Image (tube, helix red, strand yellow):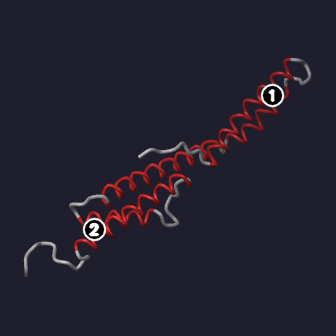
Amino acid sequence: MGRSLRVPAIGLAVAGLLLAAVLSVGTTWLLVATGRWDAAAWGVLAEAWRAVAAFIPAAVVLVAFQVYRADQWWKRVEWALDAASDEEHPVRQLAGLTALNELRRPGSWRPPRQDDRMFRAVGAALSRHLARRWDEDGGPGADTRGGAE
């Protein structure tokens, strides 16, 4: 299943922080090199970035957790889609449809809009297919074993 590139907000914040660090070091270097600031400016800059740097590991862990959670969610979706399309095992098929329904609920990791639309379309197509098949077979209470009991 294709996955679009998703950049969580915390990832953008970390990238912005790194860009700000590079720009501030570059600006300070230029100002010290041209004689507009004295060398003490490096000490002030170091103290400021030491405070900011304390939050970088937490941000990296948060981004890693979000990526891991999204990856696990997609693995569950792939299993559920595979199970829901299993024509030969109705119990597994029902488990797959139930899992798909649970994965769309609030509290579960949410895909971006385009993936969510695809997810809903696949679920609707599977539901229509199963409804047609159950109508043809006589519904869930029908005896499909071919013999009288």
Q: Badge 1 is on which residue?
A: 42
> Residue flagged by tag 2: what amino acid is it?
Arg
Picture coordinates of residue 14, whole percent (x, y):
65, 41
Q: Nearer the viewer, residue 120 or 100?
A: 120
Q: Nearer the viewer, mark 1 or mark 2?
A: 2
Question: SS of the residue at dot 2?
Answer: helix
Residue lying at the far bottom in this picture: please name it.
Answer: 149
Q: Residues within 10 Å of mark 1 (few under 14, many from 20)?
A: some
Question: SS of the residue at dot 1?
Answer: helix
Picture coordinates of residue 49, whole percent (x, y):
74, 37
Circle number at residue 21: none
CB-based contact (under 8 Å), mark 1 and mark 2 = no
Picture coordinates of residue 106, whole percent (x, y):
52, 66
Residue lying at the far top in this picture: please name it.
Answer: 34
Q: Quadrant of residue 22?
A: top right
| N-term-proximal mark, 1 vs 2 | 1
The residue that appears at 34% across and 55% down in the rendered structure is: 79
The residue that appears at 16% across and 77% down in the rendered structure is: 143
Q: In the drawing, does residue 110 fall left or right of residue 54?
A: left
Relative to 86, does residue 94 appear above or below in the rendering? below
Q: Residues within 10 Å of mark 2 (few under 14, many from 20)?
A: few
Q: Badge 2 is on which residue?
A: 133
The residue that appears at 32% across and 61% down in the rendered structure is: 84
Residue lying at the far right in this picture: please name it.
Answer: 36
